[in-house]
Amino acid sequence: MKENSDSHTQLYSFISDGQTFAVKANDVKEVRSHHELSTITPVFHAPDIVRGYINVRGEINLVLDFRKMIGNEAPRPASEDLIFFKESTGPAFGILVDRAGEIFSSKNSDLEAWTSAHDISSVSGSVKSRYTVSICKTEKGLISVLDPSRFMSL
Amino acid sequence: MENTDSTLLEEFISEASEHLAESEQLLLELDSAQDGEKKELIDRIFRGIHSIKGAAGFLNLEAINAFSHSMENVLSLVRSGKLEARPDLIEKLLQGVDVLNKMLDVAGKDEHTECSALLSAFESIVSGKSPAAASAPAKSLKAASFVLTQEIIDKLPASSSFFYEIHIKGNPDECEEAFNELMNFGQSIERQSIAGGIKLFFATMLDPDMIGAAVVTEGSEILQLKIQPSSSAPAASWPSNPPLQEAPAKVQLTPSIPIPAPEAAQEAHVRKTVRTETVRINVEVLDHLMNLASELVLVRNQHMQYFTGRQDGMASEISRRFNAVTSELQNSVMNIRMQPLGNVFGKLPRIVRDLASRLNKQIDIEIAGEDVEVDKTILESLADPLTHMIRNCCDHGIEDPPDRVKVGKTPGGKIFVQARHEGGQIIVSIADDGKGIDPEMIRRKVIEKGLKTADDLRHFQPRQILSLIMLPGFSTASKVSEISGRGVGMDVVKSAIEKLSGSLDIDSIPGKGTTLTLSLPLTLAIMSSLLIESSGQRFAIPQVNLEEVVCLFGKEIAGKIEIFNGQEVFRYHGGIVQLVRFNEVLRSASPFSDAKRAEIASSNAAAEQNAALLTSAGLRSLNIAVVKVGSRHYGLVVDKVVGTEEIVVKPMHPMLKNLKCYLGAMILGDGSVSMILDIDGIGKHALGHIHGSSSSSVEHEPEVIVARSDDAQKVLSFRSGPHEKFAISLALIKRVDWIKAENIQIIGNRRFVTVDGVPTQVVSLDQALNVSPCEIKDDMFLILPKHIKRPFGILASEFEEIEDIVAHFDSRGYVEDGIIGSATVGPKIVIFPDIYRVIEKIEPEWFAGEDVQKRDRDANSKIRILLAEDTPFFRQLVRKYLESDNYHVTTAANGREALEILGRQKFDMLLSDLEMPFVNGWRLVEAVRANPETRELPAIALTSLDSDHDRRTAFQSGFSDYIVKIEREKFLSQIAKFFARYNPEKKAASQ
């Protein structure tokens, strides 16, 4: 990320376990409500974070369960949303989140690169630090900006 | 090679291979061609080799260039009539083709292909005959007289590599004729008159060696003009000419060789027509296109599912068009990958010719159906097995000429290769009229080699014995020969065919010959599978892995399943098969340990025992998919069998690649995703790795008709003698009566009983079939069939149950006249007697003097009937009936398939069921009537629907007649009557 203080980065926010996270809007292919889609087919024997397969316009996508990824044990909301990522971040996959948010613009100067030094400061509670690339400072608080290409590294 | 673009090289190789394949074919034809045809054949071979030489020169492939050049020299002598195309010369040229093929394989690599012997042979042929050696003095021009002006340069065609100044001498007529000849080979840039003739600036593809042959007049002079590519714009676009750059001062002069005028003219004509318009496409692009088309089909299916039943005129119109366009698109894309079998068949005559001469046999090969098309992948994988089978025919099948004469055959043997479409598959049959295979000899060999014991073979039918030659390690040649190899024969062929999801069948009559029949799917991109359900999810078992679906009912479950070595097993076809509970596999992500297996086994056994005690028998059922992969063979217990589905296989997501139980994923018609099971992986997961040979594996024939839940037949199963279980389709039974044995009266040698006041003849199956005698008990059952003229009933000692047979219907099992086939229900084999044939065998005089004799069986063999019927049972039954009267029958599993077949072949009659999937009988006949090609085709509805309304709609749709299923004699005489009625009309119409 070029640290040009004048330029902006478009981010896409989502909520899981009451916390707000974001990914770069450029990485998002599409967002769907779970109920719009046919049910997710579970894949037996798959790792815990794999929710299953889903068909999105003829393409089979792997769905990861973001709650499981961050170790959220709270009860599931009645409705969940699916965020699918572009191929540039990894082969056809998406994550299941409590609620998809919106696109927002963040000044690059408000983004602070995540380093191991942040690990102890627990900026966003239980988020596994390995998914986080930077911290976005907003009026409402700090948001972890995640890198989807790291989601599939177990 | 540093400057050679690799794509250019690829292009060259693929094109040269085509030329060589064609040349080979033509050389073989040349062998037997009439004199009149030879000229054109030689011309075409010459052109092929010539283009290879030209392109090889262009690409600096020196070895290929030099070799093809020497071949071309020989060919040009043949062409000009100076050399005769005798078999030994053709042999040499064929070898030359082989050498070039080998060179192509290593083209661009730093490898040398040995060809010096052949090369010098060609050279000596040429030097013996060549006019150069025959001392004709070369006539040359001392210097070029044309001035290379910009005007000339502009006129130079880009396609010509060579330029000459040619002086033609003679009177004006001769000059004109010679000039016209030359125009067949290139173009004249400038033409001027000179003393005693004309001179030309000539641009051509012909190289300095060849130009002499093109100039037909005596005393002509030729000079090659070298045009150096310069950096100037027009010149830069000229093709480079490496040999000239190397030796710019070299002037090639050759004597003129006269060529008769008509030949050259003909060649030019042929050249124009041979060219076809094609575009080469990368296979990857094609595959991608095909994937997309397959996806579109799935989207279409979802769309149709969603919109079906919605009453919206516009929407349904759009849907209809979407549907039609998608189908057409899919067909077209599939067609791109389809290639004619001729591409593989074309190589066979050469193989046969070579083998025949090496084995000192006379063998002719006849090929039919070259234009039948299959998927490229299948075609490519078919070449080797096919070659192997042909080799077997030549080596083991066809006898030596003296042996043939001894048994009253012609000295020359014949191999007949035929391809055709049938029932959605490609059937390739390879038949020879050789010595056939002796089952006794096979039996002996198998026992001798310890592949099976005499005990194993006791119950084998002759046909099953024949299939044993496909066992690994079996070779029938008493001598190991170079040709068929060392026992790596038919098992390799069989596994290659099975890899293509095909099957291989052997039939042989000792002394008469052998027929190998291959059944292949049309395409591999779409795989057929059995959908099953377990743990609430649907899964697909690839059809290749599926042997059979077995359903155990009620008390059978506890009875047939046992625990052996801590593993559940069940009895199957006289063998023991391990059971895998798929639900348990899904529950445990880690492979089963021995302890886990034992735990599963005992808990399930207890559960089954309890279930057997608690629930009334007959309510519970257990579905077992018997699957196989390699030598592994097990029963997969699933919750439910859903049906078959054609699927497009998608690879697993990289993150899930390490899951061994799945082959891939797929999208079902309703849009949901399902997993495709890896039968090998599941076997390893649940049963561990195979050690040693599995004693439980029983050799099974490939399935003929595959299980489908909607193929379920309601049958009545019963016993007559103590040993066999029989079944009759409920559709054929009027009712079953309970009778007392004491009421059966014997009159003469017949038995009668009174049913509804009518004396009814009582027959038992052992009177007509080779089965155990009917047990006579106090209480007996009498099965009264439908559609009979004289009352009779079949005696049953025990009435078992009415059941759905979901299992496949296996016509290759127990076969006897009077038996339609057998099927496996649970662990038992059930025999389906043909009740009408049974009564015909017992009371032949009932049928004598009736229509039987009027039916002209010989004439029938020319009558081709297309039978569209979705139920395998009836398909088999009706087919057998028709074939017993000598009709030529082709079958289709539904209306859609029937339409496809009708598009390719001509038939004399369409016989169609009404209720069928995809395209039903009514729609089928409407489509037939709508097509001008088939409008006149007689069509008969063959159905179990028997109401006035059904008849009316059938006739309205365009059926010419209506037959209710199905009594053999009545049916056949109806068909015969129909043809008798129809034929005079046809004759009248054609006059």
Image: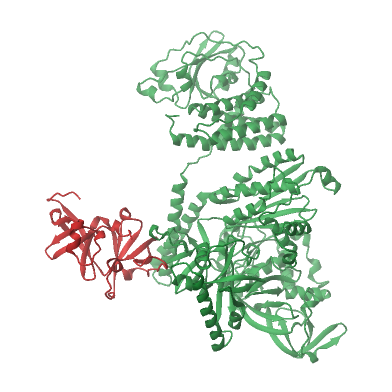
**Residue B776 location in percent, x, y?**
78, 86
Observer-nearest of A92 and B983: A92
Q: Nearer the viewer, residue B400 or B818?
A: B400
The color scheme shown is: by chain
Towards the viewer: B586 or B212:
B586
Residue B248, position as x, y percentages in the image: 46, 15
When asked about the image quadrant of residue B44, the answer is top right
Quarter occupied by residue B854:
bottom right
Chain A image colour: red
Residue drawn at the location 76% of the way across and 54% of the way down = B437
Left or right: residue B143 compared with residue B34: left
Q: Is residue B991 visible?
A: no
Q: Can residue B135 be seen in this view?
A: yes
**Residue A71 horizontal/vertical position (percent):** 28, 69
Which chain is depicted green? B
Residue reaching furthest to the right: B748
Q: Quadrant of residue B853?
A: bottom right
Q: Pick the quarter of the image with the C terminus of chain B.
A: bottom right
Above or below, B7 against B449 in this view is: above
Give residue B397's position: percent from left, percent from top: 75, 49
Tell me if residue B930 comes above or below residue B230 in the rendering.
below
- Left or right of B532? Residue A98 is left
